[in-house]
Image (cartoon, helix red, strand yellow):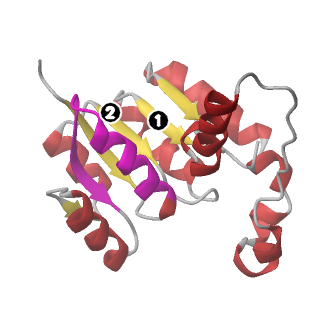
C-alpha cells in the first residue's frame, strides 16, 4: 500500500505532539515541515526524521504534491494559512480554531466549497497524556462513576504568552 504523503505546517508544541502520533502510524510519510522559526523546524525534522525543511509553502506544494496538509501553526495564523493553501484542493487537517471569528470560519467554509477541498478541524484532546492516564485508570478500576473537567489551560501564563487578538476571543479560539 502506498504511503500517504503529509506536509506539516508549523513547528511548535502542537506539531510535535501530532508528529508523535503520525510516527506510530505506518501508512503516513511526513515529506516536509514548514515554519517561520528555522531553529524549531530543524529540531523537529531531526527528531522525527523529516527530510525537507523549507519556508516556501507554495513552491513546496507544487513540487512535492502532498496527499494531505496538516496546519499546526499558532491559533492566530491558522485561518491565514488555510486560506492560502485551500486552492490546491489537497485535503487539510486544521488544528483548532480554524478562525478567530465566525466570519473567518464562514469564509474558510466558502473557500472549501469553491475549491472542493476536504478539511477537518482537529479536537485531539484524546491524545493528551492526562486523557490517556484517565482512560487507563478507568480500565484498571472499573466503570466510570463521575467526571469533573477543569479547563483552565494554564491560565497563569495567559497574560505572558497569549497574543492580544487571541485573548479577546479566548473562548471561541479554544473551543
Q: Element at badge 1?
A: strand
x and y percentages locating residue 42 in the rendered image: 26, 72
Q: List the residue tagged with mark 1.
A: 93
Query: Cα distance, mark 2 to mark 1?
Result: 8 Å
Q: Which residues are magenta?
A: 14-34
- Disc sitting over residue 68 in the figure: 2
x and y percentages locating residue 84 in the rendered image: 45, 46
Going 69% across and 41% down the picture, which residue do you hit? 104
Going 58% across and 33% down the picture, which residue do you hit? 121
Query: Is residue 112 visible to the viewer in this orientation of the structure?
Result: yes
Q: Quadrant of residue 135?
A: top right
Asked if the stretch drawn in magenta spans residue 33, the answer is yes
x and y percentages locating residue 11 in the rendered image: 40, 63
Q: Quadrant of residue 43?
A: bottom left
Left or right: 94 as drawn, with respect to 64:
right
Left or right: 15 as drawn, with respect to 168:
left
Decide: few, some or many residues near mark 2? Use Cα within 10 Å; few <14, some 14-19, many ≥20: many
Query: Is residue 98 visible to the viewer in this orientation of the structure?
Result: no
Asked if the stretch drawn in magenta spans residue 63, the answer is no
Amino acid at each position: 500500500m502506498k504511503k500517504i504523503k503529509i506536509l506539516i505546517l508549523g513547528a511548535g508544541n502542537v506539531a510535535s505532539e501530532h508528529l508523535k502520533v503520525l510516527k506510530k502510524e505506518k501508512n503516513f510519510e511526513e515529506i516536509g515541515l514548514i515554519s517561520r522559526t528555522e531553529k524549531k523546524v530543524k529540531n523537529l525534522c531531526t527528531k522525527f526524521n523529516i527530510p525537507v525543511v523549507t519556508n516556501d509553502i507554495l513552491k513546496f506544494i507544487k513540487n512535492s504534491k502532498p496527499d494531505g496538509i496538516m496546519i499546526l501553526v499558532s491559533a492566530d495564523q491558522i485561518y491565514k494559512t488555510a486560506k492560502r493553501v485551500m486552492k490546491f484542493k489537497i485535503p487539510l487537517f486544521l488544528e483548532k480554531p480554524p478562525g478567530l471569528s465566525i466570519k473567518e470560519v464562514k469564509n474558510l467554509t466558502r473557500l472549501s466549497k469553491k475549491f472542493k477541498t476536504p478539511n477537518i478541524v482537529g479536537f485531539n484532546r484524546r491524545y493528551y497524556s492526562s486523557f490517556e492516564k484517565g482512560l487507563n485508570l478507568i480500565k484498571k478500576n472499573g466503570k466510570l462513576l463521575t467526571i469533573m473537567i477543569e479547563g483552565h489551560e494554564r491560565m497563569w501564563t495567559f497574560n505572558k504568552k497569549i497574543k492580544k487578538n487571541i485573548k479577546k476571543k479566548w473562548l471561541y479560539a479554544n473551543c
